[in-house]
Amino acid sequence: MRKIPIKNYLLLFILLAVSAFVILLIFNLFDTKKKENSSDFKQLNFGELDNYIIENPDVIIYFATTDSIQNKYYKKFKDFVNKNYITNNVIFIDNKDISNKDFSKFISNYLNKDTNITLKDYLIIMDEQKIYTIIPIDNENPNMDIIKNILIEIGVL
């Protein structure tokens, strides 16, 4: 029986180590990319929103597409929320698959009046299961003072 040289075992070990390193590197890159494209807040489907509001009557709803979470407003809002320790009060709804009709119906239900609001990126502040205010997301001028004043007014801050 022929003896296998130690050099072959060493090459096998190096090959396995390099393969494991490459797999970990790819996994880490994928995981980082996945985190960049997901919200830092609790995410819900639009269909779950009514039940969530019943259980959590004072909530801040960030209506936007997942693509927009890389923008200036989102980053400033996330810093504001973290600084004020209200992360549990904020949910993220991806509005990509929501129709204008369904969105208007949702708004009408919680405003207690008919409305024909167009679906775009909004911050909706709820107080006691009613819409307190709807703030259009302005990426050019993200002003957190407005939000802070409203949250103080309704007793969240």
Image: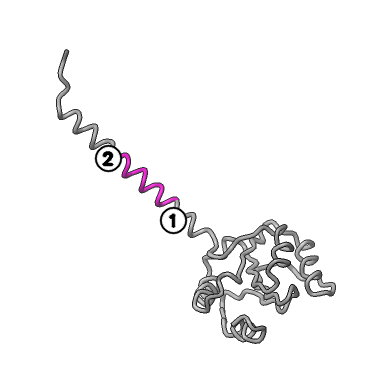
Magenta-span inclusion, residue 90: no
Residue drawn where x is 53% and y is 69% of the image: 71
Q: Nearer the viewer, residue 56 or 97?
A: 56
Image quadrant occupied by the N terminus: top left
Please tell me how crowded label 1 is: few (under 14), some (14-19), or many (20+) other residues with Cα within 10 Å. Answer: few
The residue beneath circle 2 is 17
Identified by mark 2, the residue type is Ala
N-term-proximal mark, 2 vs 1: 2
The residue beneath circle 1 is 32
Residue drawn where x is 53% and y is 64% of the image: 40
Question: In the image, is 84 to the left or to the right of 89?
Answer: left
Farthest residue to the top: give it.
1
Identified by mark 1, the residue type is Thr
Farthest residue to the right: give it.
114
Q: Main secondary structure of the magenta part?
A: helix
Residue drawn where x is 49% and y is 54% of the image: 34
Q: Which residues are magenta?
A: 17-30
Q: Quadrant of residue 127?
A: bottom right
Q: Position of residue 6 (x, y in %)?
A: 15, 28
Q: Position of residue 78 (x, y in %)?
A: 52, 72
Q: What is the C-alpha distance between the residues marked 2 and 1?
A: 22 Å
Farthest residue to the front: give it.
55
Q: Position of residue 84 (x, y in %)?
A: 52, 79
Residue drawn where x is 49% and y is 78% of the image: 83
